[in-house]
Amino acid sequence: MKSEELALDGIYLAESLIDVIEPRAKALEAKCNPNHFIGMAWIAMPYEASLTEAQAERVFDAFGAWSHAAAA
């Protein structure tokens, strides 16, 4: 698993976050071995905060991210 924290320097509507985050996500994906790459997800928060990997795992688990990755 690879992760990267991105702190944006402005206020964005949820609908425009993909335009800001996608280039960073593509760069992170490029660092992955394509034979091991299954999928990608991101968490956006409306306030300044950091999550530990364990906290992020709980968020992904709550939304069924692991079962989606297995289906991919």
Image (cartoon, grey):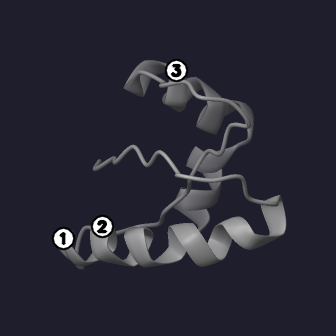
Q: Residue at x 60, y 65 (%)?
A: 71
Q: Is residue 71 above or below residue 51?
A: below
C-alpha distance separating marks 1 and 3: 23 Å
Q: Residue at x 59, y 28 (%)?
A: 48
Mark 2, residues whose alpha carbon is within 10 Å: few (<14), some, or many (≥20)?
some
| Secondary structure under the numbered disc 2 in the rendered image | helix
Q: Tell me where residue 38 appears, x and y as whole percent.
A: 41, 67
For mark 2, what is the residue?
28
Using the image, tell me which numbered label, if any, was put on residue 31. 1
For mark 3, what is the residue?
55
Question: On the rendered structure, is 22 left or right of 25?
Answer: right
Q: Tell me where residue 10 appears, x and y as whole percent.
A: 62, 53
Residue placed most toward the observer, 18 or 34 = 18
C-alpha distance separating marks 3 and 2: 20 Å
Disc 1 to disc 2: CB gap under 8 Å: yes
Q: Residue at x 39, y 27 (%)?
A: 53
Using the image, tell me which numbered label, if any, was put on residue 65. none
Say what amino acid the circle numbered 2 marks: Leu
Question: On the rendered structure, is 43 left or right of 3?
Answer: right
